[in-house]
Amino acid sequence: MADPVAAPAPMAGAAASGTAAGRPQGLWERLEQRFGRREFLLKSGWGFFWLFLGGWLLSNLRFLFPNVLYEASLAFKAGKPDEYPLGISEKWKKLQRVWIVRTPQGFYAYWARCTHLGCTPNWFDAEGRFKCPCHGSNFNPDGDVIAGPAPKPLWRCAITLADDGQLFVDKGRLENRPGAREQGEFFLPYAAA
Amino acid sequence: MTSVKQYVKKTKVWKSIFRHDFADSPRTRLQRIFGNVFLHLHPVRIAKDAIRVTYTWGLGGISFYLFLVLTVTGILLMFYYRPASALAYRDIKDLSFAVTLGGFLRNMHRWAAHLMVVTVIFHMVRVFLTGAYKPPREYNWVVGVLLLVMTLFLSYTGYLLPWDQLALWAVTVGAQMAANSPLLGNEGPFMLPFISTQNDARFVLVGGTVINDATLIRFYVLHCIAVPFLFTIFLAVHLWRVRKDSFSLQTGEKVDVWPHLVSREFVAALLVTVILFVWSIVMEAPLEAEANLNVTPNPSKAPWYFLGLQELLVYFDPWIAGVVLPTLIIVGLMAIPYVDTNPKGVGVWARMGWQRVGPTRLWVPTERPFAVSVFMLGVIMWFVLIFIGTYDRGPNWEWYWPWEPWSYRRLTKMTLKNLPNLWGLVLLGAYFLSGTPVPKPVRDQMAARGGPKAPGLASAALHVGLGLVIAAAIFIPLLTAPDPDYPARSRYPTLFESLGRSVNAPMVSLLYGWVKHVGPAAGYAMSGLVVLAFGGALGALGIAFGKFKDRLYDELGLIKYSVVMALFLMMMGVLGKIMLRLLFGVKYVFSLPQFNFNI
């Protein structure tokens, strides 16, 4: 290994310059030779400056996300099932933004919020359509889009019976896929008395 | 009296404030400008051509003056306004009806804001049409676009503050657009796995999951402090650069800025003030009922300058209309000075003239025909959308002609259908391929092999072919694809049949009417002819502009050409999709509902 000519090819350059300087090279020397001490300190200094500045600004981005929200509960009790006739009830639209639908088989509930951009649609009984006033989306009684720009069906809320026999609607749990939305907590079987 | 004046002028106090006399001497004219912090943004002398009223119409200066008016009236309004949902609406009512001059100041703030949106847009159009963005002023154009965006954002954050119905629903829609941004919105395409309603783009804008007090204080701070702060910084850069780059390319005789420019600015400011005063006395700023999340006004219309965007949202998914298209418009505007290499038309208004274009004579811009036409087409499209949103939309956002009375109970027959994805891909592919140029080396090679007419023929074949593919990709799926929404019977009706029954897709119902009235064989044959004619027309358009495209490619090179062509095709594509929706009842050209990805 003492003979630089016999060294393996990749090492040749480094070994040659090492012998030229007259001393063996460590990692530190090679770094210094590659970057130069002054340039290395300058670059790492500025690097850490921008890292600090960027990190500080990014941490302020996190500051904009509140940790505690003071918002109303998404679940509410909607009275006894027998208070509802067959069809779409607008009883809770003003207070809770929910339509409660009763069919001969049972109950389900819509969140009265257009899946396009969040306006509150209106129910047109004669046509059997929900129509949104903001961009003209139309939904059929199943909540499926039949016209306008809305990309997906209306959301259905979880609906169960509370301990006191009232309907319990939760807007925090939503479903709109055909198949999944007609079962489980999104449909409450209830036969007419 | 004069002696008192003489005495005052000799006091140390006077001399410490005013460092020059007021005689109209050349020396004083200069001193007035550079001895005054407010005036020294001006140069002391300026080319006569640069301050011609018919050259700039003073639009930039008027915008700046309106910004000052808005700052002053805004500061005054802040004395009475408290940004809390329980108080805000009452405070605005108080301002309008109980506070002396409160209503007047509020009107003035509102109308000045509307006027500023107008003057900023017209300023941009003026700068474009006089080529004032060309080197060395590219960067200042970019800063100007940012100022336009901030002007609109200031308007948007401003109209939440009254906490009325308009405010609430405009902000609901705006915030929901944030929820539809790609990757970072919880309803957008290709949402990142950790995104939910608790941490998406909407959450940070609104300060929670529903619009309430947290939103109000956020928008208040943005409107009164944060955005004006940024705006002022960019405004300083903008004005300073205007001066450093010597006010567009103007040579010729120079005149003193005091009094020639300063007097014009003064008169313009006076005129604007008079207009604002009259406007604010005659018209009240609108204030709707107090915000109520459970009742959406029907129809619910944004202020006029956002109605174009609202109308666009009807034709596209929110992530396209609300996020991608605005971004493209902004980026596209910023890119203009960097892709426009034509050095002509700086410092003069674009001239129009009658010229032969293909087979007809058209009234077109003579010096920069492509740049001016495309830019103005974009501006006009934007205002047409605003016009449609303002005058052609009624209850449930349905189409009502301006002379039609509105009816809240009008039956809606419209249904919309998607094109099958494969056909949609063919359509999109053929459309964007029609931007392909034939570069010079390829043309030369073709000419060498197939004679001098070969490149022209190849280009013609390409464009007619693509035109026919586009036409086929619209019509064939309509005629053949089954309507998946229709309840299963003995057979599915085709999209064509189900759309033909709906009155709001006039093109399809026309063809459907033919099939019904003259029998299937003749009806389908006539429809086929329409398809051929449509494809042929598209192809003819392609041929007419084929040579121009090749020349553009040779001049701009690959990267600039791709940027220009992509932006241009997307702009025309927006128009195309609007036509597909209005005439054919097509909802999506391509749709992947699993990823919220719909075009």
Image (cartoon, coloured by chain):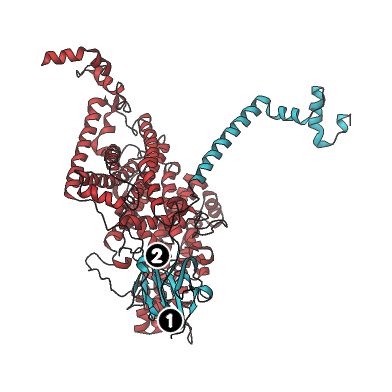
Chain colours: A cyan, B red
Q: Give residue A5's mark.
A: none
Residue at image coords 30%, 54%: B303
Estimate how packed mark 2 is, as few (under 14), some (14 to 19) or many (20 or more) residues with alpha carbons within 10 Å: some
Up/down of B425 relative to B167, above or below: below
- For this rendering, which residue is in front, B52 or B284? B284
Q: Amino acid at mark 1?
A: Thr
Up/down of B538 relative to B505, above or below: above
Q: Amino acid at mark 2?
A: Ala
User: Which of label 2 and label 1 is nearer to you?
Assistant: 1
The quarter holding residue B175 reads bottom left
Chain label for disc 2:
B
In this rendering, position of residue B450 left or right of residue B23: right
Q: Give residue A103's mark.
A: 1
Where does residue B431 sit, x and y in percent of width and height? Answer: 47, 61
* Res A44 visible: yes
Q: Could you tell me which secondary element the residue under label 1 belongs to?
A: loop
Determine if marks 2 and 1 fall on one subunit.
no
Where does residue B372 sit, x and y in percent of width and height? Answer: 35, 47
Asked if the residues shown at circle 2 and circle 1 are in contact, with their CB atoms under 8 angstroms apart, the answer is no
Where does residue A120 sit, x and y in percent of width and height? Answer: 37, 65
* Res B324 visible: no
Chain label for disc 1:
A
In this rendering, position of residue B287 left or right of residue A62: left
Q: Which residue is mark 2?
A: B537
- For this rendering, which residue is in front, B42 or A64? A64
Where does residue B312 sit, x and y in percent of width and height? Answer: 38, 59
In this rendering, position of residue B354 left or right of residue A155: left
